[in-house]
Amino acid sequence: MLIFIENTPRTYAWGSVDALPEMLGTAATGEPQAELWLGAHPGNPASVAKATKQPRTLIDLIESDPERWGVDGRDLPFLMKVLAIGAPLSLQVHPNAVQAVAGYRAEEERGVARDAPERSYGDPHHKPELLVALGEMTALSGFRPVDDARRDFRLLAASVPAGPSREALHFAADLLSAEEPSTGRRRFLAWALGASRETADAVRGVSAVVRTVRDADLGLDPLRTAVLRNLAAAHPGDAGMLVSVTLHALRLQPGEAIFLGAGQLHAYLSGIGVEVMASSDNVLRAGLTVKHVDVDEVQRIVDTEELVEPKFRAERCRPGLVAWRPPVPDFQLMRVRLHGAEEEVFDAAHSAEQIDLPASHPLVLIATEGRVVIERPAAEFAEVAVVKRGQSLYVSAGEPILIRGHGEAFIATVGESFAPGADTPVCR
């Protein structure tokens, strides 16, 4: 079955006032609209659009007949979101499956209330995630080479007058000078998140530098300077600003992606994108926030190895179809681009007239440009749905689907390792 789904955007302080309304074709409310959830996560399940007089969520639909509507008789293992970022999110890291079980069990045994501000684990599941930019985005993602971070701390120190701030920034560089880079990063994190007088001195120094020193005189990469300036304005006095210097600073163009595996420290800073993740909400914050930061748990979870390639490349399957297939069973994400006889949103060299996809597991689809037509011609009763920009569709498991029209859509489903051999590969 082809079922329209919808949801109300979540309003967080870091959201954009206009980016989501513009994409969804709705009126801006004046509130910062941050996230649109398209899935069956208990925290904010999507609704089945215009299905019955009584509101019905995707969870209700799946529970009514798990074999028909679910994934092999179970809940969706993935959650799709659209993120609209108007201000930097917190520095954060997510656990692997073993860490999530241990962390959840420990908080349950300690009697930490599920809604307590110091609670880190809402469920016993891991949370890998993938983000694909719809427009230009900026982000921090994974540790970069320590020599690059040390150089930048020394450049910052050189622009600070002699005194405690300069000494603290040199100390930060020295902490990263361990024989083993991972050890140096772990030592640096313990210091940066330790709320000491020296970390406060270092933060004051960085804030003063990016506010008063010209980019050309500072000598940092322009993107790095812009990131620090943004963080100093959004989170004054927060030591996450220091941690950011040790991470890759990225500018993502539309269609570029990052994959965030277990333990990878990251923060989204600006822009709009499509995200797909394991269906979990476990977040360990490490700065750039007024919320609880559990330093010991962050240190237990974080992966301090260098991330050699911070961007995650799409696989070009065939004209009009690309797929991001990270090494997890929970999800993969596809993008289709179509040119139709009525109108060409994308040129023929980078799109197709129609694309067929396997659907032996459920799919969640959102149209991000133009209008796409979804058909299931081999079903017992032929099905068709016209999905306009901003609309979303839940496709139950069954016969392959045919996609045509003129526009762009993103489609999430389980990873190919979820049930090996069950699906015809997307990139065949």
Image (cartoon, rainbow, N blue to C red):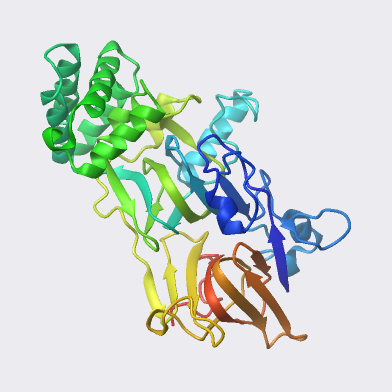
Find residue 60 and report its image quarter.
bottom right
Question: Residue 273, how many percent across, how many down?
Answer: 47, 55
Q: Is residue 3 left or right of residue 329?
A: right
Image position of 24 (left or right of 4): left
Spot occupied by residue 208 in the image (x, y as percentages of width and height): 24, 22
Residue 34: x %, y % from top left: 55, 44
Quadrant for residue 4, please give it: bottom right
Q: Compared to 36, does 118 lie above or below? A: above
Task: Point out the image quarter for the C terminus.
Answer: bottom left
The residue nearer to you, when weighing 63 against 157, is: 157
Q: Is residue 179 left or right of residue 32?
A: left
Residue 302: percent from left, percent from top? 36, 37
Residue 48 visible in the shown view: yes
Left or right of 281, for residue 149: left
Give whichever of 384, 40 is nearer the camera.
384
- The quadrant of the picture occupied by the N terminus is bottom right
User: At 41% across and 30% down in the image, what residue appears?
Assistant: 234
- Residue 345 vs residue 73, the one in the foreground: 345
Instruction: Judge by depth and name the residue closer to the eye, 161 or 341.
Output: 341
